[in-house]
Amino acid sequence: MSESGDAQWIEPYEGYKFAAREMTVEAGEQERLLALCGIDPALFAGAMDPAGFISLAIQEGVRNRVHANGTVNMINSIRQDRPTALGEPLVVSGEIVSVEEVPRGRVATSETLFSGKDGRRAFSSRRSSLRPDAAKAGVRGAGERPGAVIDDCSRLRPMGRFTLTPEGVQAYSGPHNPIHFDPEAAKRGGFRAPIIGGGQGVRFLTATIWRHFRPQVLELDVFFRRPIFWDDSFEVMVDERDGKWRAICLAKDGKVATEARINVLE
């Protein structure tokens, strides 16, 4: 489903369930998206990059008539319970678990599950996103802000630097949210230029993890602190203490843009 004018969108409400369906992720699509990020697709050795499920979860909402147009990621908790092979049949389901009124609009939280045909869960994504109210443009406030995971970038270990291009971000972004590829839509959302989607940013985090580990189980709480624009440069940095990775982030100009608390890395 594309976000066109004839779509019968609903306003999300607590308890709204997504229709369960079967799906697969083809290797060619993951290869295309990773290549647009400058990431070697061979890194995941035929398995799904967990970051890819973030966009798939958003798209599942769109399939179920919950639009993503103009929405902004705030928090995304993801868990890989087992590696998922590219091309593996999966059953996806989900629901809206809460909706909260905030000064800028509403924050909707959804949970999307991806399971094998045997019923064994492979991946889950719990996402809170701001749905701005156009009548409240310029108003600040999106609800309670969780405390920082990383408070000092100077003590982090740098792992790589990346530079985005408008052409690459536009080619990566799907049709569901023009805030990622349309300058006018981005300005209406209060941004100087289009911003990358949360799932695209997390690709750089999971790729860094996979270069050093090949986890069977991974759990991250991802926080989107500052926008990353389609022409930005940023670094991937790791908070490592006593040989253990505790957190990982994308930082630009010495400040955290996207950060993830590493809860499980096995």
Image: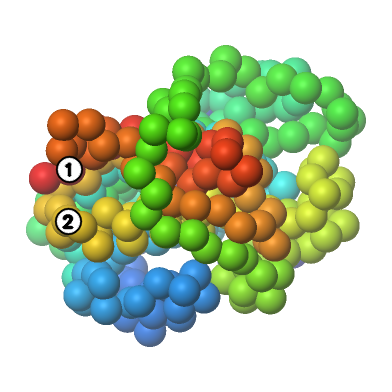
Q: Residues within 10 Å of mark 2 (few under 14, many from 20)?
A: few
Q: What element carries label 1?
A: strand
**Residue 27 at x, y percent in the picture:** 32, 80
Q: Which of marks 1 and 2 is nearer the N terminus?
A: 2
**Residue 84 at x, y percent in the picture:** 20, 63
Give the residue furthest to the bottom.
28
- Provide the residue designation for mark 2: 213
On the question of residue 142 being in view, the answer is: yes
Give the residue furthest to the top.
144
Q: Which mark is residue 93?
A: none
- Front disc: 1 or 2: 2
Please report contact status of discs 1 and 2: CB closer than 8 Å, yes or no. Answer: yes
On the question of residue 126 being in view, the answer is: no
**Residue 12 at x, y percent in the picture:** 59, 36
Q: Is mark 2 on a helix, strand or loop?
A: loop
- The CA span between labels 1 and 2 is 8 Å
Q: Nearer the viewer, residue 107 or 152?
A: 152
| Identity of the residue drawn at 79% across and 32% down | 133
Q: Quadrant of residue 189?
A: top right
What residue type is disc 1 on? Leu
Q: In this view, does 81 lie to the left or right of 41?
A: left
- Provide the residue designation for mark 1: 265
